[in-house]
Amino acid sequence: MCGIVAYIGHKPALPILLEGLKRLEYRGYDSAGVATLDDDDLRTCRSVGRVRVLEDRLSRSGGSRGTIGIAHTRWATHGAVTESNAHPHTDDADRGHGIAIIHNGIIENYATIRTWLQDKGHTFTSETDTEVLAHLIGELYAGDLEKAVQSALREVTGAYAIAVICREEPDTLVVARKGSPLMVGVGKDEYIVASDSSAIVAHTTQAFTLEDYNVAKLTRDSFRTTTVDNVLLTPQIRELEVDLEQIELGG
C-alpha cells in the first residue's frame, strides 16, 4: 500500500519527510519521491527503488531548505514502475501554477478527465491517474488552492488520500481523504500528515483523522477543515495510543 507524508512548519521539511518514508517502508513500495517549496521554488525528486536511493539522489542535488513539503512511496497501479510514474506529480510545466500532489487510491474516471484536459491543451508526462488530478487542480486554480482542490474533488469518482502544495501559495498545505486513510498530527506551529501514525508520533502525539470527503487547509500556525462542498467542520483531536518506542521495538 502506498505511503503519504507531508509537513508544514518552521523546521527543514526534507529530513522529516525522509524519516517518515522510512517508517512507512514496512507497507511495501516500488518507487519514492518528494517535493518541497524552497524560496518559492518547487523542487521535486523521484526515483525507482528504495528510499535510500531517493536519499542519495537528494544529497547529490544539494537537498532543500524548505519548511513545507510532501513525500510518497508508491505501489504501481496505473502505469509501470518508472520514474515518470512515481509521485509527486505536478501540473503542466509550461502553463501550470507549480502545483504538486501525492495520492493514494484510484481515480476511476481519470481517463475521461484526461481527455477533457488534453482538449484544453494540457500535456501529460506519465500514465497515472494522479497526474490527471494534478492537472485538474491546476486547471481550476484561481489563486486559492483550497478551493481548487475542493472543486477538483467534486469532479472525480474513486478513492483518494492526497496532499497538495503550490508554488504560488508557499504557506499552505491542503490535504483530503475519501476511502484511503489519512491523519493530521498537530504540533506547535507545525503539522505532519501521514497515511499511518508511525510517521507522526516522533513529532507529536496529538492528531485528528480525516473522514471521507474531508479537506484540511494547513498553515504554519492554524488549520481549518471542511467538506469538499466547503461546509466547515470541527475535527476531534485525540492522543495517539501508539508511541515511538513501541514502533521501534516492533521493527
Image (cartoon, rainbow, N blue to C red):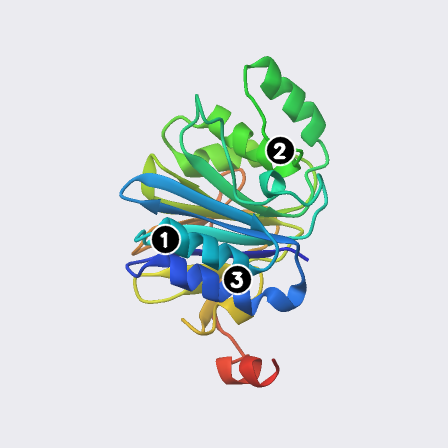
Q: Residue 152 falls in which quadrant of the image?
A: top right
Q: Is residue 215 visible?
A: no
Where does residue 4 sit, x and y in percent of width and height?
A: 55, 56
Tell me which numbered mark, 3 or 2, is placed earlier along the sequence: 3
- Given residues 52 and 148, the one toward you in this image is 52
Quarter of the figure with the N terminus: bottom right
Q: CA distance from mark 1 to mark 2?
A: 24 Å
**Proximity of marks 1 and 3: CB atoms separated by less than 8 Å:** no
**What residue is shown at x 59% (from left), y 20% (from top)?**
117
Which mark is on residue 52? 3
Q: Is residue 159 visible?
A: yes
Disc 2 on helix, strand or loop?
loop
- Give the residue at mark 2: 126
What x and y, as percent, mark residue 55?
Answer: 47, 58
Distance Cα–Cα, label 1 vs label 3 = 14 Å
Name the kind of residue labelled 3 in the image: Arg
Q: Which quarter of the picture shows residue 85?
A: top right
User: For mark 1, what is the residue?
Assistant: 63
